[in-house]
Image: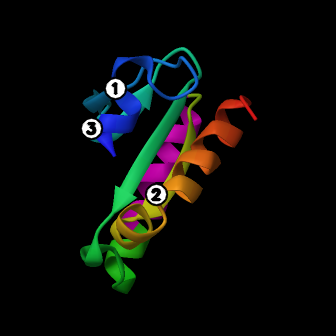
Amino acid sequence: MWGYLRDRRLGGFKFNRQVPVGPFIADFLCSEAKLIVEVDGATHGADHEIHYDEKRTAFLIAQGFRVVRCSNDEVYHHLVAVLDGILMALGAV
């Protein structure tokens, strides 16, 4: 997915990857739009992992960010839909 987000390739928006935000590392961050994209792997399905993700998302929102979450499976099998969802969150569609 990084190949589609880097170098302003998605709607002209600049993304960085693996960016520290407080005690967390955002997978992909668009500072100008205050948007974080999180790609969740298989390890995000247990109750304690879901709770951790909810706590993390609440922190990021409290910092003024919007958070888009998708799964690895969605990225591998439905990348166009994931990118379209990011563009919608950016207000570019």
Give the CA distance from mark 3 to mark 2: 29 Å
Contact, CB < 8 Å: mark 3 with mark 1? Answer: no
Where 60 sits versus 13, above or below? Answer: below
Say which of marks 3 and 2 sits in front.
2
Q: Quadrant of residue 14?
A: top left
Residue 91: % across, % down: 74, 31
Frontmost residue, 83 versus 49: 83
Residue indicated by mark 3: 23
Q: Quadrant of residue 5?
A: top left
Question: From the viewer's perspective, is 40 left or right of 36?
Answer: left
Local crowd size for mark 1, using a 10 Å CA cut-off: few (<14), some (14–19), many (≥20): some
Residue indicated by mark 2: 79
Report if residue 75 lies within the magenta region.
Answer: no
> What range is drawn magenta here?
52-63
Tell me which colouring the rendered structure shows. rainbow
Residue 92: % across, % down: 71, 29
